[in-house]
Amino acid sequence: MVEFKHRLKMLRKEKKLTQVKLGEMLNYGYTAIANYESGRNQPAIADLKKIASIFDVSLDYLLGVNDIRHPYIVDEDSAEFNRFQSYYTQLNKSNRQELLLYMQWLLDRQKKLQEENLLSAKDGSETASLRVAQTETEYKKD
């Protein structure tokens, strides 16, 4: 598990901040940052929150509890992934294996189509992508 002092130094260097600059951002001197990074001192909770905000990471990540920088980010793919996960959990073991094989086939096909599109872009021809399944709405109409 990564300690706070190492995580802080890594994040500071990632953002290309000096100890002086980070200290200014937190309204105290660089020696405080040097002391945090050496492990001599620990910041107060309010300062931890500020540091996490500056580096756009969770407190758990900053403190080395886990390696998940943004555990609560909701993006437009979340609902779609949750729907997928719901369907997946309803499958039996055999069907899950079949789904995994199908997903691998899709990835292979995607890679092949991307390679073909790169080749066709060079010679000016077009490649059409085939759809294997209907949308959920179309499927439920049949």
Image (cartoon, grey):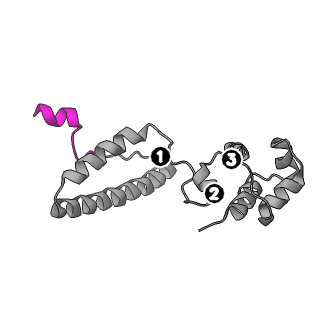
Which residue is located at x 21 percent, y 40 percent? Answer: 134
Q: Is residue 44 above or below residue 74?
A: below
Q: Which quadrant is home to the C terminus?
A: top left
Residue 1 is situated, as x and y percent measured from the top left of the image, at 59, 68
Mark 3 or mark 2, which is nearer the start of the sequence?
3
Residue to which mark 2 is pinned = 63
Which residue is located at x 67 percent, y 42 percent? Answer: 53
* Quadrant position of residue 68: bottom right
Q: Check residue 45 in the rendering and tell me which mark sits there, or answer none.
A: 3
How would you rate the neighbour count of disc 2 (Cα within 10 Å): few for under 14, some for 14-19, many for 20 or more? some
Q: Check residue 37 in the rendering and tell me which mark sits there, or answer none.
A: none
Farthest residue, direction left: 142
What's the CA distance linking mark 2 and mark 3? 11 Å
Q: Foreground residue, 69 or 49?
A: 49
Residue to which mark 1 is pinned = 124
Q: Foreground residue, 78 or 25?
A: 25
Query: The magenta stretch spans which residues?
Result: 130-142
